[in-house]
Amino acid sequence: MASPSPIVPVLSSMFIAYIALGVVGPLVPLMLLSHGVPAPEIGLVASCYSAGFIVGTLVLGRLIARIGHRAGMVVVSVFAGLTVAALTVESGTILWAALRAAMGLGHAGICIVAESWLNSHAGNHNRGRIFSAYLLTTWGGSALGPLAIGAFPASGGLLLAAAGVLGLTALPLLQSRAAAPPAPPANRPRMGLVALMRLSPVGIACCLAAGLCNTAYYAMSPVALAGQGHSTGEIASFLVAINLAGMLVQMPLGMLSDRIGRRQVAVSALTLGGVTGGLLFHLADTGMAVLVAAGIGLACMTSGLYGLGASQTNDRIAEDGGGDTVSASGGLLLAWAIGSTVGPTVAGAAMAWIGPAGLFFYLACVLVAGAVFTAIRMVLRSDAPRDARAAFVDLPPAGHS
């Protein structure tokens, strides 16, 4: 097995980053609410974060490839930390929206550095496990962050503390002697979203579906359950259950995709997820225990979609003779970010049209459409050879932003 030394520094950096992000994510809306900001304006601030993330995926890949991964992580993490610190200036919703957009841009850069670093160092025999470890690391940091909100009041001081932690993200990379990924050759083709769509339609479709489904699921399921009359305690139990399921399924899913193929696992997950979403739609009036069980099943099916899509795309890049993995990471994140921006809005419209259970109707439709598309592509094109398969990689739930 390859030495873990090149992997540990970036995992450590991401653990630090996601502790801070786990604080800032829920803290910002809580502070806005305490300042009397109405819900629509809070939603605007949240949307600006996603918009900034999208911009980051478009513009930061080339910068990181030019200055290197270590310097790139320093730039994006310090930039993100400064934007969090600037949130302590209480000058209105418009300023906060702009700062959250800037923070989303920095977050995208952190993800691009980490994913391209891991994809460069992982070996064919252990890629799925390495990237599952990456996901577990980010989930662990995100889970620790909110504990600070329970221990300390929501205030500018807590924001400053989170900003300081975020600014330290690059420290493990700077202290490590592990070799950074080399800069891509000047003649290596850049792998933007359009090029990735041509190379791997299924990969991009899975990344898009991940954004469309996971962000809406984790953000809107509390609204759906509350609308169905469930208590705050029941909703909390549901959220804990689906978050744990999404975390624990990553390692076996990564190993399975390494063994039998990405598209085979993807079409199964999309199909079973669509069926489970349909069950949740029809079980809206049933007991909480049944809803939790079905919710866990849906989380297990949807939480690995980005990883399957990214891995399938990297398989095609390897099969095609290689490409710029930094720009490829940016393109994959862009597909996810587009879905995560659109998803909650469309899900909310479905809930307004059908009722609270419209969330699960929406999720079922997206997943079934993805399954049909993947099945068609499997008929039209064969899989990448096993020895050319690339990395299984995933993102934490959208709520961790």
Image: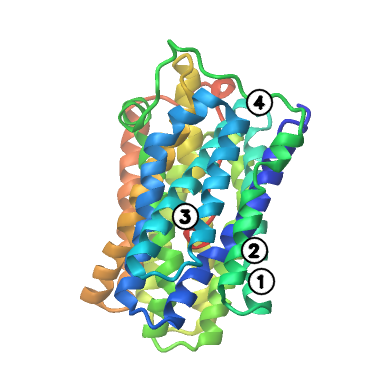
Name the kind of residue labelled 3 in the image.
Answer: Thr
Residue in the picture at 47% in, 44% down: 108
- Does the image show residue 229? yes
Mark 2 to mark 3 CA distance (whole Å): 33 Å
Q: Which residue is mark 4?
A: 180
The spot of residue 375 in percent (x, y) is 35, 39
Mark 1 to mark 4 CA distance (whole Å): 33 Å
Q: Which residue is mark 1?
A: 148
Label 3, secondary structure: give it: helix
Residue in the picture at 41% in, 84% down: 226
Name the kind of residue labelled 2 in the image.
Answer: Ala
Of the two numbered discs 1 and 3 in the rendering, the one whose residue sits closer to the viewer? 1
Name the image quarter holding residue 69.
top right
Q: Which residue is mark 3?
A: 302
- Give the mark, 4 or 3, whose residue is nearer the N terminus: 4
Label 4, secondary structure: give it: loop
In the rendered view, would you say 50 is above or below 224? above
Name the kind of residue labelled 1 in the image.
Answer: Ala
Residue in the picture at 44% in, 58% down: 214
Residue in the picture at 25% in, 69% down: 350
Name the image quarter holding residue 254.
top right
Is disc 2 surrounded by few (<14), some (14 to 19) or many (20+) residues within 10 Å?
some
Name the kind of residue labelled 4 in the image.
Answer: Ala
Nearer to me, 97 or 334: 97
Q: Which mark is residue 298?
A: none
Label 2, secondary structure: give it: helix
Q: Which mark is residue 161?
A: 2
Of the two numbered discs 4 and 3 in the rendering, the one whose residue sits closer to the viewer? 4
Mark 4 to mark 3 CA distance (whole Å): 32 Å
